[in-house]
Image: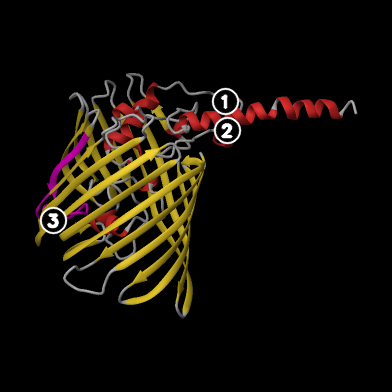
Amino acid sequence: MKRILPIIFFIVLILPQNFAKAENEYLTQELLSTPQVDEVTIDDDNDIYSQENATDSGEMLFKISEKASKTPQKEYKEETLAQKIFKTQITRTDIPSYLLKDVLTHKFKDGGSIEFFATNRSSLSALFNPHSYSTKYDELTTEVGFFGTTKDKTIDYRLSLMPIPQEGKSYLDNVLSDLYVTYNKIPHHKIQVGRARGQVGVEGGSSTYTLPFVNRSQIARNFGNLRTTSVKLIGNFEHADYSLSLGSSGRTFTSGMPGIDFIGWVNLKPFGSNDGKWGKLTVGGGLNAGHNDFNYTVGTVYVGYKHKRLWTNFEASIADGYNGGAGLSNKQAGGFAYTLGWKIKPYLQIIGRIDQFDPDRTVSGDTKREYTAGVNWFIKGQALRLILNYVFCQNDNAPDSQRIILGTQIVL
């Protein structure tokens, strides 16, 4: 009996307090806006795009680098590298995080810094057709490179390479992923010059390492998911931000200047830059227009909302010719995607998406639809993550099919 009483006392008085504390911390701040000891975060006021739409552009990645150079790091002198990684707590999932940032970051004596990185994103798919079954492994993205900033934070820079050849593509054309510099001295503005991701749509311009699903939506992978060599002006204010770029319509490293390409995007943020009691609402729109053998034009609208555990958005595009990641086309195409997500825990998220694409609006009966349900397990934020997706593919002119996809993501 003497042994039982202390146990009962512990259960009644101690455990409920811990559970209540954990729940209150989560509901109050959702952890996503609370910097962790071993996590690099950025200030909401300086976020050029809404956090749930973090992009590969310089202003995002180099804000992280800049913050890292100013953030004191906790030292584990007697711990191994594996122990450091195991103890690292990363709860934010709106920006890419780096598992080995402490090890791979070098700080210069003059105050600048450079961080090296390596990433991999792969998937294993089970394909179910009406009369067949197959499996497929895809090495989706592998990158190596570095990014950094100068002493006075005036210049940011980034170089990333994709060393693994892509099937059906020229190695030299696609080995260079990013190569650009960003000038930061103008208040509320940045000027970026070089090869970088283009903001054609929100999901189409988002970082590969913040995508909620294994694959992008159909409009994102056809109209967006591209890189271009250009001069880009980026602006960020309390209730609006924008990105305007002018450059080459060639999408590969060696394509030269086949024509002029313009990409513009504007976001309105009615509730301001910071999450508040009403959540974060973003309303945006953009245009991609240019010439490459023929003229092309893509228009996109976007509405996104985030509040505590809830995240949802709607994006629609219409094109009279397009020049995206899937290639150049003179078709009149269009489509939309609606996504809904809910975080059960800071590390566990359930998501769903309705996705429709019409590859040629002048032809009837060729619409493609994808219905996707999934689970994200953020083991270490976006730095170490498992993704499980179920996709039902419904085609007007082809048999329906199903896919189960297991995705892995690691960012070092």
Q: Is disc 1 placed on a helix, strand or loop?
A: loop
Q: Mark 3 = which residue?
A: 297
Query: Residue at left 20%, top 54%?
Result: 251
Q: Residue at x 48, y 37 (%)?
A: 99
Query: Residue 105 at x, y = what percent?
Result: 41, 30
Q: Residue drawn 32% across and 24% down?
A: 112
Dividing the picture into quadrants, the one containing residue 296 is bottom left
Q: Residue furthest top?
A: 110
Precedes in sequence: disc 2 or disc 1: 1
Distance from the alpha carbon under mark 1 to that under mark 3: 54 Å
Neighbour tally class for label 1: few under 14, some 14-19, many 20 plus, Cα within 10 Å: few
Identified by mark 2, the residue type is Lys
The image quarter containing residue 168 is bottom left
Q: Which residue is mark 1?
A: 76
Left or right relative to 107: residue 176: left
Question: Can you say whether 392 is above or below 243 in the image?
Answer: below
**How many C-alpha atoms fall within 10 Å of the one at disc 3: few (<14), some, or many (≥20)?**
many
Task: Indicate which disc, 1 or 3, sits on the residue closer to the N terminus.
Answer: 1
Crowding at dot 2, Cα within 10 Å, few <14 / some 14-19 / many 20+, comes out as: few
Q: Nearer the viewer, residue 167 or 202?
A: 202
Q: Does 98 appear above or below 323?
A: above
Q: Are marks 2 and 1 in contact (CB under 8 Å)?
A: yes
Q: Which residue occupies the foreground of this view, 380 or 279?
A: 279
Mark 3 falls on what kind of element? strand
Q: Is residue 125 above or below residue 407?
A: below
From mark 2 to mark 3, how far is it between C-alphas? 49 Å
- Report the quarter where the C terminus lies: top left
Task: Specify whether 356 is left or right of 245.
Answer: right
